[in-house]
Structures are given as structure tokens and as C-alpha cells.
Image (spheres, grey):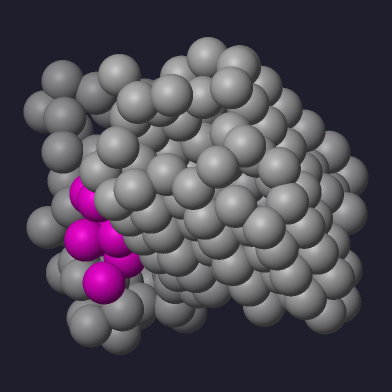
């Protein structure tokens, strides 16, 4: 095993994750992506192969992380990597404020200036993006994405695979179901049912 971090997903979020990893001291980062046939580089980082190539060589890497924006695809790839014996890791940016009492699921990323407060529980493969805030006792399911600048008050529940859009807000003790989409800038003041899309202030289905 080396000190190299492997990232699956050579796109915009991958760039953010690679930068974060270097901030944490990883000396080398390499990418894998299913567009390997046409994508050999991401900025200055090498793209080594596709997902099958990563699965074949997982033991070579000190850590592996999936940097795919699609929530379901991200969870699918994380699960396959774990089953193959990969050391799937989580990353927390040095500028993020994450309470020691937080439970953070494997394969999750907490980006710069994000805040996750005491006794929040974050499921596997979550993204807590730049400047997002997750307050005390929140419970986030698997594959959730809290987009940049979104704010969750205390005791909010967010179900698996839900997407909380940029700059949106959810008041305390509200539940958002699974597979939900909260549009950018929305203010959620009541529960959102599974698979609903909501927008505006106050947020309503659309």
C-alpha cells in the first residue's frame, strides 16, 4: 500500500475533493473515471483508468473516495468499492467545524467552512458542501447532498438520496423524505414527502 489517494470521478466535484485531500497532506492524488478513453488528465492530476481498473487495483491505494455528484451513483460506487475491500475514507476540510460528537458515515466529504454541530448523524456517502450548516441532532441519510450555503436548523431529518439546494434553509424539527429535491434558495417550513420537489419561500411542491 502507498500513500496515494484514488478518487473516482474526474469532474468539478473531483477537483474540490482532490484539493481538499492535498490540504490534508496527501502527497499524491490520482483519478479514475469512466470517460478515461478521452480524459487522461484533470488539471494537473492523472486519470489512470475507469472504474473497473480502480476495482482491480484497490489494494494499491491508501484511501479511495467517490467524487460523483449524482447521489445514487455515488452510493452504488462506494458500496462496490467496500465490497471489493477498498479503504473508502471520509474527508473533512481543515476549515470545517465538525463537532467531536458527530457521527460521520464512510465515504462522506465535508467541504471548506462547513459546520456540523453536536450529535448530528451523517449517513454514508454524504456531501456537506462549502459553507453549508448542519445543526445539532440532525439526521441525514445515505447519499445526501447539502449544497453550498444551505442551512439546516436543529433536529432536521433528511432522507436517503435527497438534494438540498444551494442557499436553501430548513427550519428546526422538519423532516425531508427520501429522493427529495429542495430547489436553490428555498425556505422549508413543513415536512417534505418522499420524492417531492419543492421550491420558493415557503417551499411548496412543484
- Image coordinates for residue 93, horizontal then vertical, percent: 76, 49
Q: Examine the rendering and report whether any part of residue 122 can be seen.
A: yes
As drawn, 10 above or below 73: above
Quarter of the view holding residue 171: top right
Whether the magenta-drawn stretch holds residue 15 is answered as no
- Image coordinates for residue 37, horizontal then vertical, percent: 11, 28
Q: Examine the rendering and report whether any part of residue 67 can be seen.
A: no
Whether the magenta-drawn stretch holds residue 77 is answered as yes
Q: Is residue 171 left or right of residue 52?
A: right
What predominant SS class does the magenta segment belong to? helix
Residue occupying image coordinates x 86% and y 76%:
100
Viewer-side residue, 45 vs 126: 126
Q: Is residue 194 left or right of residue 177?
A: left
- Image coordinates for residue 191, horizontal then vertical, percent: 49, 48
Residue occupying image coordinates x 43% and y 38%:
163
**Quarter containing the C terminus:** top left
Quarter of the view holding residue 150: top right
- Image coordinates for residue 185, horizontal then vertical, percent: 61, 17
As drawn, 79 above or below 7: below
As drawn, 138 above or below 100: above
Residue occupying image coordinates x 20% and y 71%:
80
Residue range in magenta is 70-79
* Number of dots carrying numbers: 0
Q: Is residue 104 left or right of residue 171?
A: left
Q: Is residue 3 left or right of residue 144?
A: right
Viewer-side residue, 105 vs 194: 194
Amino acid at each position: 500500500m502507498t500513500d496515494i489517494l484514488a478518487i473516482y470521478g474526474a469532474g468539478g466535484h473531483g477537483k474540490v475533493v482532490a484539493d481538499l485531500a492535498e490540504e490534508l497532506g496527501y502527497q499524491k492524488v490520482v483519478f479514475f473515471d469512466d470517460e478515461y478513453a478521452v480524459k487522461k488528465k484533470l488539471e494537473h492530476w492523472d486519470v489512470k483508468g475507469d472504474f473497473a481498473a480502480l476495482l482491480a487495483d484497490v489494494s494499491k491505494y491508501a484511501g479511495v473516495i467517490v467524487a460523483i455528484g449524482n447521489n445514487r451513483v455515488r452510493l452504488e460506487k462506494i458500496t462496490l468499492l467496500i465490497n471489493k475491500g477498498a479503504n473508502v475514507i471520509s474527508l473533512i476540510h481543515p476549515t470545517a467545524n465538525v463537532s467531536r460528537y458527530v457521527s460521520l458515515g464512510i465515504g462522506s466529504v465535508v467541504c471548506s467552512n462547513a459546520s456540523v454541530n453536536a450529535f448530528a448523524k451523517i449517513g454514508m456517502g454524504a456531501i456537506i458542501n462549502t459553507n453549508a450548516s448542519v445543526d445539532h441532532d440532525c439526521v441525514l441519510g445515505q447519499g445526501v447532498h447539502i449544497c453550498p450555503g444551505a442551512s439546516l436548523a436543529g433536529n432536521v431529518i433528511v432522507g436517503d438520496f435527497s438534494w438540498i439546494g444551494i442557499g436553501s434553509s430548513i427550519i428546526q424539527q422538519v423532516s425531508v423524505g427520501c429522493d427529495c429535491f429542495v430547489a436553490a434558495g428555498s425556505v422549508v417550513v413543513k415536512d417534505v414527502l418522499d420524492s417531492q420537489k419543492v421550491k420558493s419561500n415557503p417551499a411548496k411542491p412543484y
